[in-house]
Amino acid sequence: MQQALARVLGLPAPPALTVAGRTDAGVHARGQVAHADVPAERWQEAAGAARRRLASVLPGDVRVRAIAAAPPGFDARFSALWRRYSYRVCDDPAGADPLRRHDTLWYPRQVDVARMNQAAAACLGEHDFAAFCRRRDGATTTVRELLRLEWARVAPGVAVATVVADAFCHNMVRSLVGAMLSVGDGRRPAGWPAELLAARARDSAVMVVASHGLCLEEVAYPPDAGLAARARATRRLRPAVT
Amino acid sequence: MQQALARVLGLPAPPALTVAGRTDAGVHARGQVAHADVPAERWQEAAGAARRRLASVLPGDVRVRAIAAAPPGFDARFSALWRRYSYRVCDDPAGADPLRRHDTLWYPRQVDVARMNQAAAACLGEHDFAAFCRRRDGATTTVRELLRLEWARVAPGVAVATVVADAFCHNMVRSLVGAMLSVGDGRRPAGWPAELLAARARDSAVMVVASHGLCLEEVAYPPDAGLAARARATRRLRPAVT
């Protein structure tokens, strides 16, 4: 993306891109947001054709849905209020649509969505999510606020989790989904994920599900007037927030 | 599939599979139909768990949606009345959803669906489709009956062609779609595909679009009592029908 921007805007070097969701390798993103600082005159010249020209330069697995000048104080990463992810699972032991295999985990044991939602509800709120995080350099805290975590059966044999938090630690969604699938198929009690959470330590019994079922769907920001204040507050609380 | 059947049914050798649509490499199929002759006692033992066991043996890009004993006289290929294909095109010059790139052609010129439908209507009926076919060994005739050919815009930037015929020659759908896209983007007049058809000879001006946008969606058969008669009639008319 950085190289494509340099080419389309005619910059001498690729601009640094700041992204809202620093997802693991293999995770999809329909709603990624990023910003870059570029010279105003370059942008004004290229703005009208930028999206079309980026599409002709980028590989087929990356597309820009919208591009615009950012309001003052905007930071794609630190101004964000929350991120929404989805995780798509096929639990039909005989099934899994081959045409959706690139964004769907095949979990060949049927899961009980109501039971997973019971487990999920007990994890909502602000907690130390150390049990579901892989520490990485620079991460100073694993406290996050989980705003929404719920499962829906969107088609026979297909269940989708919606997960919203102010921010996520490394591997957090994939670990939460793994713990809930162990509840959904009956191997663990519905209270197990909340017990893990309370222990505040990573537990090897939690399965980290594959990255390809996960998709960053949306990143939300405050109204323009609140962007800079939000960025300052986030940087203070979580210097290495992801 | 033949090897998976041998394994699941405990056969000494893979059974020969006869498929309804002998699609080109890279073409998808949500509605493929196939038959194989297997010993009745092996089938009776394995029938209940066959679909689930096949899913555990097959690679992720192949799944069996339903499996059953066939009625007398059934031939997956020769008993078929018609085949329905879809072809999915993204014509947004700035777009193309990366998550659908495996089953969507990106055609970065906007197309006029009404104009393509005008071109399509003139090709309906029984014709010699030599202009849209690549001859292959054993094909004795290129006469086919085109029962339906129409485009619909299913989402902004996405147009899907539905194509139904009694049977198709090699490359026929991909050549028809290519000719219609040249009409849709304004480079050819709406009467061009019908003119090509009337010439009854392959024309190098026809673009054969990529295989990955094409999907075999459905194969239709007569009621059980008519299966054997239909197979006899098809074999007589088109010994190498595809």
Image: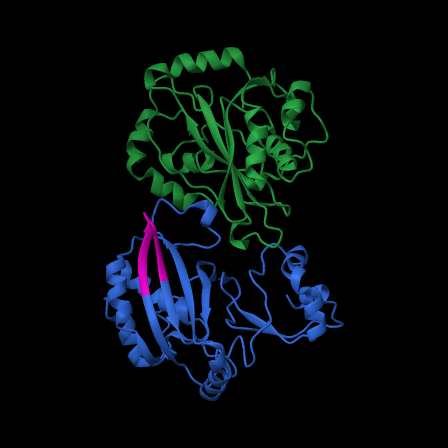
Chain colours: A green, B blue
The residue at the point 54 percent across, 26 percent down is A121
Total labels: the figure holds: 0
Q: Nearer the viewer, residue A202 or A75?
A: A202
Name, please, the residue furthest toward the right.
Answer: B12
Is B146 left, or right, of B112 in this rendering? right
Is B173 left, or right, of B8 in this rendering? left
The residue at the point 66 percent across, 68 percent down is B2
Q: Position of residue A51 (x, y in %)?
A: 35, 39
Determine the main secondary structure of the stretch shown in magenta. strand
Q: Which residues are magenta?
A: B150-161
Q: Position of residue B33 (x, y in %)?
A: 53, 69
In the rendered image, the vertical position of residue A99 relative to residue A195, given as above or below: below
Which quarter of the picture shows residue B207? bottom left
Q: Quadrant of the C terminus of chain A?
A: top right
Q: Nearer the viewer, residue B182 or A162?
A: A162
State yes or no: residue B68 in magenta. no
Question: Would you say residue A136 is visible in this rendering?
Answer: no
The residue at the point 59 percent across, 46 percent down is A91
Q: Position of residue A217 (x, y in %)?
A: 45, 34
Name, please, the residue furthest toward the bottom.
Answer: B236
Which quarter of the picture shows residue B143? bottom left
Is B130 left, or right, of A198 in this rendering? left
The residue at the point 38 percent across, 26 percent down is A38
Q: Position of residue B130 (x, y in %)?
A: 38, 79
